[in-house]
Amino acid sequence: MHESKVYLVGAGPGDPGLLTIKALHLLEKADVVVYDRLVSDAILDLIPGGVARINVGKAAGRHSMPQEQINDLLVSLAHSRRRVVRLKGGDPFIFGRGSEEALHLHRHGISFEVVPGITAAMACAAYAGVPLTHRGLSRGVRLVTGHFRNDEPIDLDWRALADPDATLVIYMGLANLDRISAGLIAAGLAPVTPALAVQNGTTPAQRRVFSDLRNLPQRVREAGIGAPLLTIIGRTVTLADVLDWYFPDEEFPCAANHRSVCA
Ligand code: SAH
């Protein structure tokens, strides 16, 4: 019998066209696919009908499976199936807990491979015409998580992040946007620094808010957009004035996209 393997596969941000060829081939040859809620329906549609699927993400009214249980599930599936695909939104190693799963598999002596995916920062920026770096505007990028428990102080190094010469991308920051905006401004980042929030980037359900750092939290509330939300802060956001190109829902330009109307 062949050795079984677990493939930790990045599904990208939502647009199935952003899946890698390697990811697509693995989905087609999988014995079972374990996926979570960030994986878009358009990508799930690419899994052949006969392949078993296990949803470990949040479904309506249910909680997602705890990480320890997912880890154990991958181990037990590897004992009974040959090709286990663990499909995760974006890139498995960027805020995806893919590395925890890989460590768990390693501890249990199970072979694995990692297939990178296009992470939300790259995809949402590209689809908004926002280069993450640009000569003269941004000489670096930082990807940080904005997720903290409500009762905990936000554990971010504001001084280091308040860099006008770099682009800051915040994953999972929706609940803490007020504190993030205030923290960066208090650390010296200009309140007028351009900012962009993207919900469901690269999908037909994409919605966006262009604003500045000071007003972003309020604008996001007014627009009523929610998770999954990615925030991009920095001077390169202004390039979207010229480079913005992706308008998935032209029929409802304000609700969906048009920055001239929504900004
Ligand atoms: N591994 C993923 C990130 C998982 S953390 C990746 O590499 O992209 C979940 C967070 O990712 C969300 O809260 C949101 O901040 C961001 N995210 C993922 N997909 C997104 C999308 N299509 N649009 C906007 N944000 C997205």
Image (spheres, rainbow, N blue to C red):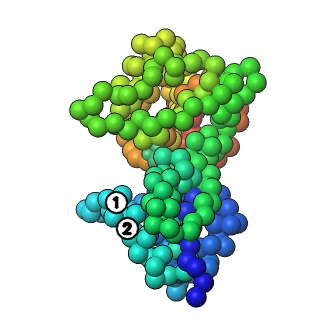
In the rendered view, would you say 224 is above or below 1? above
* Label 1: element kind: helix
Give residue 4's quadrant in the image: bottom right
**Mark 1 sits on what residue?**
68
Q: Residue at x 60, y 64 (%)?
A: 113
In front here: 241 or 73? 73
* Marker disc for residue 72: 2
Q: Residue at x 36, y 58 (%)?
A: 67
Q: Residue 129, percent across and down?
A: 67, 38
Residue in the foreground of this view, choosing between 212 and 258: 212
The answer to whether one can see residue 176 in this image is yes
Locate residue 69, reporting x and y percent: 33, 64
Q: Within 8 Å: ligand 1 and the Cβ of disc 2?
A: no
Assess mark 1: CB under 8 A from ligand 1? Answer: no
Q: Quadrant of residue 2?
A: bottom right
Q: Is residue 7 left or right of residue 225?
A: right
Name the kind of residue labelled 1 in the image. Answer: Glu
State left or right for residue 109 relative to residue 130. left
Looking at the image, residue 161 sits to the left or right of residue 37; the answer is right
Image coordinates of residue 119 in percent, x first then y, are 58, 48
Residues at circles 2 and 1 in contact by the CB criterion of under 8 Å = yes
The residue lying toward the viewer, choosing from 103 and 231, is 103
Q: What residue type is labelled 2?
A: Asp
Q: Is residue 252 in view from this perspective?
A: no
How many numbered marks appear? 2
Q: How far apart are marks 2 and 1 (CA)?
A: 6 Å
Q: Quick one: quadrant of the N terminus? A: bottom right
